[in-house]
Image: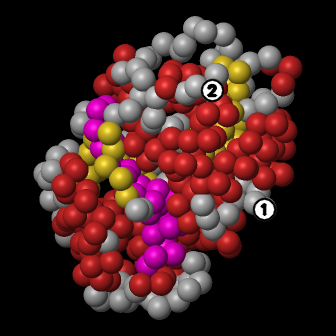
Amino acid sequence: MRTQTLLLVLALSLAGCAQAPSQGCRVGFDIGSSGIRAGATTGDVQGRVSVDYLADVWADNVIDETVDATATALGELAPRHHDCTAVAGGYSAWRLAAEKGGSDKVADTLRDLQRRTGAYVFVIPQAVEGSYGYFAAKQQLGERLTTPFILDVGGGSLQFAAGHTGWGTALGQKAWRKLFCAQVKGSENPNCATNPVGARAAEQSAQVLSNELAQAKAALGTGFAVTAVSTPVVHGVHPILAYLSHDRNAIAGRVDATGFDRAALDSAIGLLADKDDAGIVQLLNGCRDGAGKPICADRFASTFVTDMLLVRSFMAGLQVTRMDVAEADITNVPGILADERAFAWIKAYPCYLARLRAQGMDAYTSDPRSCP
């Protein structure tokens, strides 16, 4: 299944783990769909390396071509002389590889990476990733996070997460574009020309996402308040809506400094639906507002409207009338560093790999204490 209900499965309460664990130096890696980020409890390890894991998985359902790049990046981001325990989470692309290519092959890759780098890598279920994301957002935003849920749209996954519940699906910005190309545009090219999306795009998108919307509704209910924290919405959808609303007076609905309502999103999609990439950039004044301030990057014109369609579909399906926005540099590093389950599994890593082969992604949320 592409989607899972998020259940709180951390061995500790994320709401109470603001302090870094004290059991020695720990290095954590967030291996996302587009690269690796690092951090440490000592605060002296940080950085990012770009690796396109989604393209690797999409090629043959296996993570194989990026293994060398991963091993190199892990070594560059946190050299062994730090003498820290290194733990890493593999997220959307790794889950997709386990689902499509088989957990056996993923387990072989993890065993190889551990041997080559000393890092213990786990395939993190969508459930746990959601709680990591909310934890990171709460750490960064503090009292500015006023809603019970966040919306995090990554390259390979989307999740609604709260402190103790949530829901997610393997349909982030890149994955959604690939599905839109296949189901709406009739193209097997994951980077097809999505624009113009067409007059029926909102209706078609909701139809394509109907299973995900039903599962999200069953897991989360409806009408709740949510804050979008990730780049596609904070630095894409929101500033574009603000420009169309305030500078051009071209759309209906309400857009303000802290968010927008669904009516504004619907109006903007209707305005942009018949335009190709060049036409969208022209309408957006070359991606600059009236004062010359950048509001978007024109090289991303091909995803502006599909991003809007993705957000709009979930807002409509979950009866969310307004989306707040707040910039937060979401990384799963703080979550995995605070997750005692990961460090319990390190002591039983061969057992984890065996369970990964037998149980797939559920291996991580099983009890390491029950290992021989």
Q: Can see residue 3?
A: yes
* Mark in front: 2 vs 1: 2
- Asked whether, in this view, residue 129 is left or right of residue 271, the answer is right
Q: Residue at x 72, y 50 (%)?
A: 108
Q: Amino acid at mark 2?
A: Ala
Outermost residue to the front: 372
Residue 240: x and y, percent?
A: 40, 64
Does the magenta segment cover residue 173?
yes
Number of the label disc, if any, that sits on residue 268: none
Q: Is residue 228 visible?
A: no
Q: Residue at x 25, y 56 (%)?
A: 216
- Picture disc at residue 65: 1
Circle 2 Cα neighbour tier, 10 Å, few/some/many (<14 / 14–19 / ≥20): some
Q: Is residue 236 above or below residue 165?
A: below
Q: SS of the residue at dot 2?
A: loop
**Residue 33 located within the stretch drawn in magenta:** no
Residue 233 spot, x, y in % from top left: 41, 56
Label 2: which residue? 348
Q: Nearer the viewer, residue 134 or 164?
A: 164
Mark 2 or 1 closer to N-term?
Answer: 1
**Which residue: 60% across, 36% down?**
352
Provide the secondary structure element on which disc 1 rests. loop
Q: Residue 370: where, in percent of width, then height?
A: 49, 26
User: Up-down: is 167 above or below 169?
Assistant: above
- The residue range painted magenta reads 155-180
Q: How many marks?
A: 2
Quarter of the picture containing the C terminus is: top right
Task: Give me the C-alpha separation between circle 2 and circle 1.
Answer: 28 Å
Q: Quadrant of residue 1?
A: bottom left
